[in-house]
Image: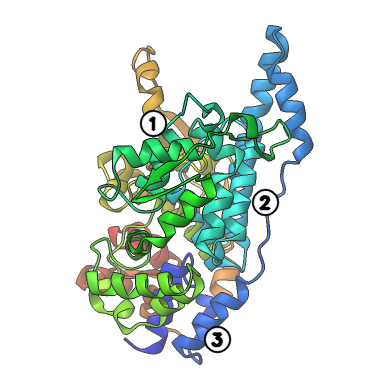
Amino acid sequence: MNSLARIKHLYARAGFGLNVDKLAQYQRLSVKHAVDELFRSSDFSQPLSLLTANQTYQMADRADKTDTLTRKMFLQEQRQQEKDLNLAWLNQMSSTEAVLREKMVLFWHNHFACRTQNPWYAQQLNNIQRDNALGNFKTLLLQVSQSPAMLQFLNNQQNRKGHPNENFARELMELFTIGRGNYTEQDIKESARAFTGWGFNNKGEFVMRAGQHDDGSKTFMGQSGNFKGEDIIDILLQKKQTAVFICTKLYRYLVNDTPDKAHVNAMADLLYNGNYELSPVLKYVFTADWFYAPANVGNLIKSPIDLIIGLNRQFYITYNNPEVMMQFERALGQVLFYPPNVAGWPGGKNWIDSSSLMYRLKIPSTVLNNGIIDFHGKADPEDEALLAGMPNRKQVKTQAQSTADWDKFLAGIPKGTTKEQVAEVLLSPEINSNLKSVIVQSGSIKSMVVELVSTPEYQLC
């Protein structure tokens, strides 16, 4: 691969794709300089600030109201805030220069999969993941573990001395750190005791409720002591398997759905020996020759969010009705802040089925041409039973109400750039004979682009 091809691959994985107006700039850059630029532009963390802490008070107060009208108004406001938060993050990903940071926030959003009915808690957790996305995993893990959203979702608010709730302790090990098969049921019981008393107040602040904490001796993974929750986290991070588990997930997200044991172990060594600093591991991956090997290029299926954001960024799309993007999310099976379960979205080939593939091939051209699309959408697993009993479920015809800035897109193409070079920027897989015929037979760059984004190859990165 030449330098530009490598940089295009880098931005497909560490961001949301490379724009054609960057061609001239990046033709002169080495991969190392491009990686440095990615980190430089992502150095600053711009938080989502749609909601305020004050709203937590108000929502808690109104949620406690017993009269039907007040509760109904509260639920309507809550649903609107959930939509607004979703769209705020979509817009941030679509416009930010800090693409690496937002790409990693998306990773941690799935790693620490969480649902909460309080939009303020959801925003708070999202900002914790943003602040620490490229920082220290231990800091990230502790702050996530003490967030109201996670404590609520995994029932640790109900974890009390004498009546331990094991949900948080179990998922901490199975999904967040060491992975299934590397702990015992007794480890879960003992660590749950260590997390007794961890909770939050109605201001959305972590509180340690000393009177509810079990201060007796616990034995966890061969160590005994009067452990608190922080001690359990420290012990888990002392295990090299935690670094292997995290790096395996990072490898599948950034490199290949089939982990290479040697490469994962090299990443894990760096993470473990570097006290769980994340940036050195990411820089190692992005500058490794194997990251750019043919087997690791154009082989990952874009997540729905990657697909939507990539379109928005590459074609400068604006929406008269931004909520159509949430219809895209539902149709494709990835609604932000609403993972299917505590394990998150499985990703990979699971993104594709007969329904989502049809939408995937149709949405890009629909957006670029302000077309109309029929939505049936994927139901949330918790809603399936309800929807199954509803008579006359109908498809919803929706106009994208989108505008692609074709003038800006076309003006950004450097002079002398061929149609095939434009196609190479848009597509990660190699240009095959079918794609070549599209390029040759298209009358203009615009018509070629619309055809190319409607191909299965555009679904890959």
- Tell me the residue at 52%/41% (across/down): 337
Dot 1: few (<14), some (14–19), or many (≥20) neighbours within 10 Å?
A: some
For marks 3 and 2, the one nearer the N-term is: 3
Residue 234: x and y, percent? Answer: 48, 56
From the viewer's side, name the closer residue of 349 and 394. 349
Farthest residue toward the top? 67
Image quarter for residue 386?
top left
Dot 2: few (<14), some (14–19), or many (≥20) neighbours within 10 Å?
A: some
Contact between labelled residues 2 and 3, with CB atoms less than 8 Å apart: no
Q: CA distance from mark 3 to mark 2?
A: 30 Å
Q: Any mark on residue 376, and which?
A: 1
Q: CA distance from mark 1 to mark 3?
A: 42 Å
Q: In the rendered image, is residue 460 in sight? A: no
Q: Given the image, on which type of amino acid does mark 1 rest? A: His
Residue 449: x and y, percent? Answer: 41, 66
Q: Is residue 442 left or right of residue 82?
A: left
Q: Is residue 54 left or right of residue 91?
A: right
Q: Is residue 64 left or right of residue 318?
A: right
Q: Quadrant of the C terminus?
A: bottom left
How are the residues colored?
Answer: rainbow
Q: Given the image, on which type of amino acid does mark 3 rest? A: Gln
Residue bearing the label numbered 2: 48
